[in-house]
Image (cartoon, rainbow, N blue to C red):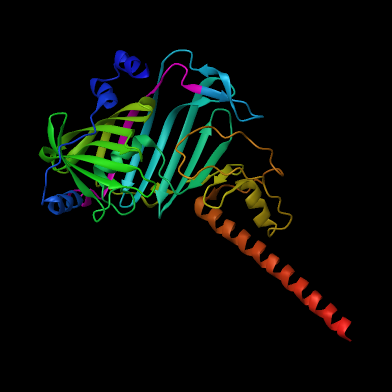
Amino acid sequence: MLRSRIVALVITAAFAHICVADSGVSVKPDNDLTRIVEQVIAGQRRVQSVRCAFTSKRFYPKGSLRETDPRTGRYLPTTFPPEDKFVETRIAVLIDGQRIRHDLEGVLWHEGLGEFRPYQESGVFESGKARFLSKTNKGGHVARWSITLGLLELYPVRFAYRLFDPVLGEAKADKIRLVGRAEQDGHRCIVIAQRREDGFENQWWLAEDQDYSVVQWQLLGPDGALSCQAIMRYEEDEQEGWCLRSWDVAALQDGEILDSSSNVATEVRFNEPVPPKSFELTFPLGTRVTDEVLGINYRIAEVAEEMLRELVDAQPIEASPRKVGDDTREEVQPSTPAHAPVEIGQISAQDIERRQYHLWFLVGGAALAIVFAIVMLIRSRKRAEHR
């Protein structure tokens, strides 16, 4: 079984523990839940900003990756990789207030070539919106607008420093409930839970001897089956308290691991000045954009040229919307540009958003004008008939 293979490979002893962790706890009444939540929130508010660089070793079991037939969309009989494979990725994270940015450099499975290829990705989440920009050595940039934060490896970082934050956090102080008490890696913990609107339930283990830091997270499906799990480890910082140093994450289905990684922090810095441009992303002309918010696809070069021509001669791109909340990082296949890019420099995400709404405003205005003209024509014909 996949589980026994992972234990045999021994990523870490705790990584094997992810596969067998018991989600059951003995329930005991606790009237101090409000006090504990306030203590966690106060501790996380002291960390206005945090920079964290870490290495992520991702595990791909033999045969866990499959190719699809581009004509039918069905899986082909061949599977990859031919042997168990570990892939190392370097990730840098910056949290400042209620904003978060990540920059990733590693490799990505390339469907169609049957191999891993170099890959880079940057992502910014602020004001309830996420923007991602990626590039492979195949050439060209791919961008995605979304409302989700993305990377599974970042969840423990958010839990460590923004668990109850109204924007970056997952737990809501007025919606959590006490499950009970349990022990995790030698820590006596209080276990809290919160059910999501989709029926899934988050559970967090807060270690009493580490100022109620999150040492374990589990996501349970509507049927109670374990869907995701993270084991988190800390070191004490003299000024900032408990600092997240390593964590193991796994996504499971039917008891088998689909995706897993072991992560180790190489650098952590707190409350340093954050330059204003730290959360800016520049999207080069020609970038292919999948907008999951508006449900459209386009190229930034085409939008730029249309705006320079006052949105005349616009040529829409066939949309292929993706499911919002999809956490995959598959490479998007290139499409043929409607016309060649115009060399006018690069466009910021804010410019793109303003031009999107400008385009929709003009299109909507033109449609209203056409409808008004048709109505007036019909009314004039009716008057002529009555005469």
Instruction: Tell me where residue 290 appears, x and y as whole percent.
Output: 56, 44
Residue 46 forms part of the magenta stretch:
yes
One can see residue 272 in this view: no
Which x, y percent locates residue 55?
33, 28
- Comparing 267 with 149, the one in front is 149
Quarter of the figure with residue 343: top right
Relative placement, left or right, of 200 versus 310 is left
Where residue 78 sits in the image (x, y, percent)?
Answer: 56, 17
Q: How many marks?
A: 0
Q: Nearer the viewer, residue 135 or 331?
A: 331
Identify whether 70 is placed above or below 224: above
- Residue 327: image quadrant is top left
Q: Which residues are magenta?
A: 43-65
Taking 382 as reference, is 143 above or below it?
above
Q: Nearer the viewer, residue 45 or 366?
A: 366
Indicate left or right for 78 with 14 as reference: right
Task: Say which residue appears at 75% left-offset and 74% top-offset.
Answer: 375
At x 18%, y 48%, the residue is: 40
Q: Residue furthest front?
A: 223
Q: Residue at x 58, y 35 (%)?
A: 140
- Left/right placement of residue 178 relative to residue 218 reads left
Query: Is residue 211 depicted above or below 183 in this figure?
Result: below
> Measuring 70% from the left and 57% from the top, which residue is drawn there?
309
Where is residue 6 drawn, in percent x and y? 33, 18
Task: Please tell me which residue lies in front, 296 or 225.
Answer: 225
Q: Quadrant of the C terminus?
A: bottom right
Residue lying at the far bottom of the rendered structure: 387
The quadrant in which the N terminus is found is top left
Residue 244 part of the magenta segment: no
Specify whether residue 55 is in view. Answer: yes
